[in-house]
Amino acid sequence: MKLPDDVKRLLDGPNFAHFSTLMPSGAPQVVPVWVMREGDRILVGTSERSQKARNTARDGRVALSVINQQNPYEEAQVRGRVVEVRRDADLAFMDRVTQKYVSMPWPMRDVGPRQVVLVIEPEKAAYQKLPFQHNPGAQPDA
């Protein structure tokens, strides 16, 4: 599917995503991740031994939620499937995604042989921006 422009913008920014996969029991497993976008596909780097990699090898259905780090009331949800697993032994993907989020190359060079990129094909995407301003701890007007 073609991702809406607002969803692409959130994915392209240095915004964390919460990535949900399915455990063997069917229970959800959720973990925060860094994401990149390649056209309308979403890329997530991980170790081939990670729980998310093992879960998606068995059942490719996934979901992501992404919030704008500057305004957490602007968010997107994406459901889809992992359609490809790419090797990232040279850490080219990890260097790009780390640069996006923390302005440096991936520091743990010894993990290269185990790194993979999960390529997600979206099947459904939604975006919303709520009319709130994040102001935790503020006292209500009396």
Image (spheres, rainbow, N blue to C red):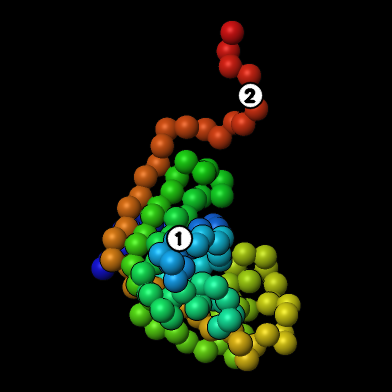
Residue matched to label 2: 138
Q: Which quadrant is the N terminus positioned in? A: bottom left
Residue matched to label 1: 28
> Residue 12, percent across and down?
48, 63
Q: Is residue 87 above or below residue 96?
A: below
Q: In which quadrant of the rendered view does residue 123 lie?
A: bottom left
> Residue 130, percent across and down?
41, 37
Residue most extreme to the top = 142
Q: Is residue 128 above or below residue 116?
A: above
Q: In which quadrant of the rendered view does residue 88 lie?
A: bottom right
User: Which residue shows up at 38% across the image and 75% down it?
Assistant: 59
User: Which residue shows up at 49% across the image and 51% down it?
Assistant: 67
Residue 86 visible, this orientation:
yes
Which mark identifies residue 17? none
> Residue 35, percent across and down?
51, 67
Residue type, label 2? Ala
